Image: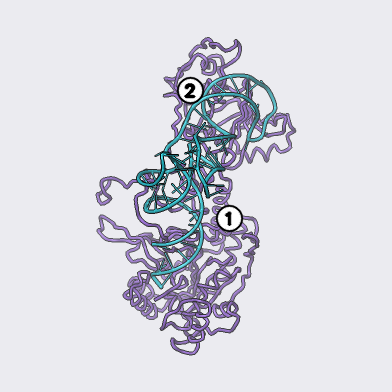
Amino acid sequence: MQRCRADRGGRAPGGGRRGGHGPGAGNRAAAGTRGLRHRRRGGHAATARPAGRRAAPAGRRPPGRGPSHRQHRRHRRVGVTCGVSAPCADPAGDPTRGTLVTDRRDIPYRFEPTATAAELHGAHRDLAAGESSGVRATVAGRLMLRRVQGRLCFGTLDDAGGRIQLFAPAAVTPDYEDFCALSIGDWVGATGEVMKTRRGELSVKVEDWRLLAEARRPFPDKWHGMADVDTRYRQRYVDLWVTPATRSAFEIRHTMVAGIRAELARRGFVEVETPMLHPIPGGAAARPFKTHHNSLDCDFYLRVAPELYLKRLIVGGLTRVFELGRIFRNEGLSPRHSPEFTMLELYQAYADYTDMMTLTEEVSAAAATAATGGTEVPVGERTLDLAPPWRRVTMAEVVSEYAGRDLPATGEPGGSAAAELRGEADRLDVATEAGWTAGRILAEIYERRVEGELWGPVFVCDFPVEVSPLARRHRSIDGLVERFEAVAAGRELANAFSELADPDDQRSRFAAQERRRRGGDSEAMTTDEDYLRALECGLPPTGGLGLGIDRLAMLLCGTDTIRDVVLFPTLRPEAGTARPPTGGDDRPCC
RNA sequence: GCCCCCGUAGCCAAGCCCGGCAAGGCAUCGGACUUUUAAUCCGCAGAUCGUGGGUUCGAAUCCCACCGGGGGCACCA
């Protein structure tokens, strides 16, 4: 039995494919962590440099000059209370400093920035070069660049929303040598007047500052950043700082998701959370992850789809519901498939699949507009426009277009329609099996040859019933169901149908799936008696939709790989960093 | 499971085809420097060349196996 992705039955653009990685304990020492030096900076601040210490002779340095920042840095690192560091640790001469500047290594418990870099750039755009604004501001973020020029130091502070320069003259900045000794990557808070340098760079003059966290590991090259994608995925906490596209992708994803939620709220949809631990994996034909609950002493499966629970809620009277959440499929990895991925599933009572088409195109367009400001998305050399309305074609039409001749949509196995389609499948080098209906063969050709060629966005409608165990039969064509896939740039973006509400028909569809399972199909669905009981309580006409959030995010971010839109993509555990908890997981924990 | 590519210092990397002291840059460390913008200049240090075998007088380089990553294909279907 050969099946295709179209026959997963559920709505999962973003499901899995089998990968080819063999087992084995890795002995790899990741480039990003191997041999990293732990930079040491002193011991405890309080003991390293007691407040109130008097200045000591400055050694061989000329009188009237402080130590170089490098010299100072060395003293800090080894935790020495050296003479040369005393001048900047002595608060006695300046009563206004208070505890803030007693010791820069004293990390505060809280800090209050008063402005972001972006706000400052907005507010002081018209300030002339060399002028001061008279306004004080406190900013905080990571020090990304540092330019020490003797008695003057410039820093580039990134607050995750933008960058602002820190301007630190030795005559103004307290603990100047310490400030110069900050590392690239250190978290710093700085307060002072907003001004522009002679070169016109908006800056905060560092009149006071605090170290908020030190970067003990050196940050990547300030210009080249991180090139190794493996390191980028594994150390996203660094990647987010040094790869602008990474931060941008997750901003786009966030605004996209927020746009979807807003659009659904506007339409009266209620957001719900249904179980992730399923006693029976259902709602899609996919291999699940299996786990075990100790107290109940029974197995659970991580959900492969929330579908059956959401439709129970329609039965329960939540007539417009959606869930935006994680799905787990124990299948292979690829640039378009992740073992855990995010899907929007929604159900609307009194609606059919044509309503779902309208909803799909409008929600997608709204999400694109929220995230990127418009509906036109660049994909490679071309542009994809998500603005409604999207083209609507039947599967038979779109396959016929591809084949260059009219092909039938339905027909019994062995019939003339099936024979005609089988001939076409052979011509297109698509493998088929005896006993398939015409619709089944058509779906196979579509999946293998046509879908990837479609630019779209387009709704491909009307699938064969045997690959859609949860969809309602087509109102006018035997052998088909009212189901569509939305395709954009050759990829399945959404999957929806008029929901099957007839408990008798549903029971027979489950039975057909059970026969497949007995035939060795590990992804076939199993009968869910409680779901049938729910249907027996009455499911009104309902339209359902599943939309792949990662897939849409990939489109809007202009990336070809799902790992670029998932913060922590599933990877093989790094050797030496991921050890299972000792003592076993079957013991009760406290 | 198969095929292709990649793995050299914390980071970016040259060297590999055609075997002969592992180049350069950033960061670090020391020195100079009061309006820089990847600051600049001088100097020091930093490498199990992914791992393990093999060939060789000699291996980052050639061969084999393995580990990790990326891509493609196949299987599941």
Quadrant of the image containing the N terminus of chain A? bottom left
Instruction: Evaluate whether label 1 is on the same chain as label 2.
Output: yes
Identify which residue, A338 or B64, lies in the foreground. Answer: B64
- The count of marks equals 2
Mark 2: which amino acid?
Arg
Numbered badge on residue A557: 1
To which residue does mark 2 refer?
Answer: A76
The chain painted cyan is B
Q: Is residue A245 visible?
A: yes
Q: Residue A333 appears at what percent x and percent y?
A: 44, 59
Identify which residue, A109 or A265, lies in the foreground. Answer: A109
Position of A30 relative to A83 (above/below): below
Mark 1: which amino acid?
Cys
Identify which residue, A15 or A120, lies in the foreground. Answer: A15
Quadrant of the image containing the C terminus of chain A? top left
Q: Is residue A283 visible?
A: no
Shade of chain A as shown in the rendered figure: purple
**Colouring scheme, one of rainbow, by chain, secondary structure, one colour:** by chain
